Image (cartoon, rainbow, N blue to C red):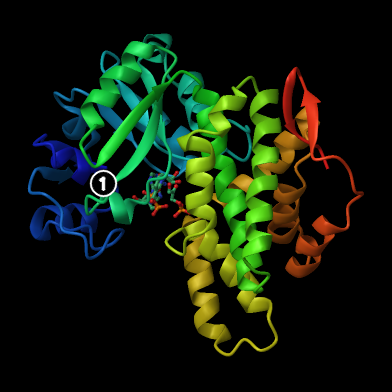
Amino acid sequence: MANHLASKGIIVQLWAREEEVVQSVNGKHENSIYLAGIPLSEKVVATSSVAEAVNGAEQVYLIIPTPFIAKWLEQNQSFLPWWVPLVCCSKGIEQESLRTPYEILVDELPGKYHSKLAVVSGPSFAKEIGVGLPTSVTCAAQDAEVAKQVQLALATKAFRVYTATDVIGAELCGALKNVLAIACGASDGFGFGANARAALITRGLAEMTRLVVKKGGKASTITGLAGVGDLVLTCSSSLSRNYTTGHTMASNSLPEHKSKEESAKNFNKDLAVAEGVKTSLAVHLLAEKLSVEMPICAAVYEVIHKGVDIKTALRKLQDRPLREEHDEYQGTWVWSAL
Ligand SMILES: NC(=O)C1=CN([C@@H]2O[C@H](COP(=O)(O)OP(=O)(O)OC[C@H]3O[C@@H](n4cnc5c(N)ncnc54)[C@H](O)[C@@H]3O)[C@@H](O)[C@H]2O)C=CC1
Ligand SMILES: O=C(CO)COP(=O)(O)O
């Protein structure tokens, strides 16, 4: 995102947690730790000081993994300007509190910040955006004017930005697609085929719809870039860490698997950065709390957090009682519950 903004001629002050990242970005114009091989603009200037990074900022982007957001805010919120848009691009749900990144921001920051909060979501692999490949995303904010400001700041010919006001819907879609991508990766890892993946994506959308609507989001968000757009992307590309996590889990469990050691190494790496791993527990708890039927997400939760055999979990999905495809759910026609 920093490189993308810099491509518009904007000076981007990038805060990085690791000193090696600061040195790599400033010295080699590359983030050789997290985004190796992608040349960064000289307009991206890294610092390990949050105060320095936000000094004079017209907009602030907070893009760290969801589990660290609350702690980061606790340590750094005094540096954050409340008068400029604060845009979060993280995709997940916090395990203990079951909050989305926006809900964390609202809880942790004083009220004067709230009207400036926005989220950006949609199909946006960093590796593609970093080299200027085209995509379209959504910026959602309660205040339409703030969404518009972010849209104008981010939009280029290659990076099309739509605005929306359904913040919670956009965020839940971004969190759930990570869990569903683990299921799709696993299905592909077993060689279950393209039909199975398409069915998982479609029924995954049903699960997204039910949770989004129950949490007060709009069903229409599901058909947008934050919903279908990011779900299709993440569920069908090996560029996704979540998809790769599921794929590796499945490949590891195959008896004919040749290189278990290498695979385990990759799996652990992916596990560390795939938001869907932790989010699957949060989704399980949220679905239980709100009485929302989410069988695919439940299967991912059971495999990762309960040690259920992955093939058994995926096969169990097909064994559920047969029924109609759609239900009327709180006045909206959505996919059926089972
Ligand atoms: N990488 C991608 O293609 C995309 C990522 N996102 C979302 O952006 C968020 C960040 O993901 P990535 O940049 O890919 O990072 P990542 O998933 O590669 O994780 C590494 C990042 O986390 C930071 N980090 C580690 N421990 C931390 C701590 N205790 N406090 C603060 N930061 C810490 C590291 O410094 C590093 O920048 C995630 O929620 C992800 O879902 C959203 C769209 C695309
Ligand atoms: O959110 C993403 C793309 O939009 C990145 O997905 P992964 O975290 O699975 O790589």
Residue 100 seen in this snapshot: no
110 or 190, nearer to the observer: 190
Q: Can you say which quadrant of the picture contains the C terminus?
A: top right
Ligand 1 within 8 Å, label 1 CB: yes
Above/below status of 96 relative to 33: above
Identity of the amino acid at label 1?
Ala
Q: Is residue 216 left or right of residue 293?
A: left
Residue 137 position by quadrant: top left
For the view shown, which residue lies furthest in the top direction? Answer: 112
Above/below status of 218 relative to 182: above
- Measured as percent of width and height from the top left, residue 181 is found at 57, 54
- Measured as percent of width and height from the top left, residue 17 is found at 29, 47
Q: Secondary structure at mark 1?
A: loop
How many labels, in total? 1
Above/below status of 304 relative to 268: above
Q: Is residue 336 left or right of residue 98?
A: right
Check disc 1 and report the residue beneath it: 16
- Measured as percent of width and height from the top left, residue 31 is found at 22, 57
Residue 293 position by quadrant: top right
Q: In the image, what residue occupies the spot 48% across and 19% down?
A: 106
Above/below status of 231 relative to 34: above
Q: In the image, what residue occupies the spot 77% across and 24% down?
A: 329
For the view shown, which residue lies furthest in the right direction? Answer: 321
